Amino acid sequence: MNDQIKDLQQKLLNASKKVLLAPKIVLSIPKNVLEMGIDVLEVSMDMLEHPWKVTEIPKHLFNLPSRVLEKLIKAYLIVNADLHQPSFANQKKILFDLIRKAKKTSFWEEYHFETIKTIKDFQKQIPIFHYKDFEPWILRMVKWELDVSYPGKIDRFATSSGTTWWTAKYIPITKENLKTSHFRGGIESLSLYIKNNPKSKFFQGKGLVIGWGFIKNPFTGEDNVGFISAILQKESPWIGQTFKTPGPDISYMEDREEKVKKTIALAETQNVTSISGQPSWMSNFLYRVLEATGKKNILEVWPNLEFFFWWGMAIHLYKKQLEALIPSKTMKYYQIYNASEWYFASQDTNDTDDMLLFTDHGVFYEFIPLQEYGKENPTVLTLDQVEVDKEYVILITNTSGLRRYILGDTIKFTTLNPWRIKITGRTKYYIDVVGECVTSDYSDRALVAACNKTQVHATDYMVAPIMYEWGEVRGAYEWIIECDQVPENQQEFATILDKELCDVNSYYYDERYDTKVLGEPTVHLVPKWTFYLWLKSKNKLGWQHKIPKLANDRKNIDEVLKIIW
């Protein structure tokens, strides 16, 4: 009963704020366009309750003078940012809404959802799922079976970079998912940016986002499988397309080189005010822009470029490159946390390295303390139970049918209520300098093959990127490989290892020999016990401490290099 009273009090408080704030949007309209006032009032009130409905703004409003339209949109976004009210009450409501929506699904019947009355019941009855555990349910959806873990048929799937159905990772995407997460998350991020930068000229130009195309569903033959960027491009409403470049005609091109060339040719004629993407991929693209245009820096191409929405990996490895490419003291770098599964969080101030977690966007969060990850029965916490500065593995239950699903990311909280987070890593290591996506599976296979061809017996290894601040080659791999006996000809081994990695990972091959932005690797073959000495120096001897084979930063490898030298 107390929870219901608190929930009602929160609703009344939110409603009163909406009554006070909503007129700001209407007051932004000049007298000479009052005939549009009723449309704007109706739409704006609806948008305050359902922010994703900003996408349904009547098209005739774009007949307004550009100055008036810009002011109107900014007013809405600032009000939307002011209305964000993080609350654990949102989380409880979301969970039980999801449980009700799952009625009559196969998943409901399998796990007896009808008996779930509390969060503890939910956690007790529903197991924790890694992707491979949940994959049988997903493949039923991919084959267009109805009412699997979400009501009805799911007809679009975000995929990983796998090239065959048995290695690809399929993430179900529903219309509700797009509205409550991806579109709403994008609106929230832009709202926070505009609130912090009200003089932004973003709406006077274009935002550059390079998407990808679709592939055929291996079971149905439909073109409904693709990267999340392709799905967002296809499903994005007209207002989203208005401020974006390039359009679907270029984004869907299969030939990556041709796509990049056409994007550059188009974008250099446009007023690009923002860019979005992974730092590694975007820095690579910006070098290509300079190469194609003959300019010294990006501001000579796009003088009004003002911010970069980035995601996917830590930016610190690339910050010097980006600052050299975009020599602007006012350039803003805003981190967002989006993935195929969901749009989770966004940086909410100009100068910070954490992100505001969205708690009312249709996803229910749970958290496993990192030290308990992998245990048979780990402690699982809800949002009201987490602590600051402790690392957690995220579980999500969402509006696309994923249930207690482990994302694979690790985070820590920097503040509570509002909850802000930092991404601290992944449950699996990987390296992605310029889009090559090398995981430990690839590096393991390449190293084993190289050892077999050279009679070297490797016992452990560590790999990290070397980043260059300028030039055509932007980075390379540095390996430390521990082996029983160090061979005399280390260069021969390095050459073979590089070739084997090219053979097992086509993306690495592309960046080494097609784009040539990855240089020749540096390989150190070191005697056995080298890593033991490193672990000992960190007081981490014991079976639970393993060598972090791959990392996108140089912290660990630099520490080991100090021991070697």
Image (spheres, rainbow, N blue to C red):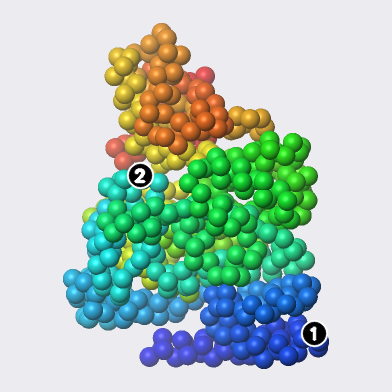
Q: Label 1 is placed on what type of residue?
A: Pro
Q: Label 2 is placed on what type of residue?
A: Thr
Relative image position of residue 326 (x, y in whole percent) = 72, 45
**Distance of mark 1 from mark 2, alpha carbons?**
54 Å
Is there any visible trace of residue 155 in the rendered image? Answer: yes
Q: Is 289 placed left or right of 549 in the picture?
A: right
Relative image position of residue 81 (x, y in whole percent) = 63, 73
Residue ID at (79%, 73%):
67
Instruction: Specify few, some or many for label 1: CA neighbours under 10 Å numbering under 14, 14-19, or 20 or more.
Output: few
Residue ID at (35%, 26%):
447
Residue ID at (73%, 51%):
269
Instruction: Specify few, some or many for label 2: CA neighbours under 10 Å numbering under 14, 14-19, or 20 or more.
Output: few
- Under circle 1, the secondary element is loop
Relative image position of residue 526 (x, y in whole percent) = 41, 18
Relative image position of residue 341 (x, y in whole percent) = 41, 61
- Pick the front one: 232 or 420: 232
Q: Which residue is mark 1?
A: 30
Q: Is 2 placed left or right of 33 in the picture?
A: left
Is there any visible trace of residue 532 in the rendered image? Answer: no
Residue ID at (41%, 23%):
499
Figure quadrant of the N terminus: bottom left
Query: Is 144 above or below relative to 525?
Result: below
- Pick the front one: 280 or 257: 257
Mark closer to the chain start, 1 or 2: 1
Q: Which residue is mark 2?
A: 163
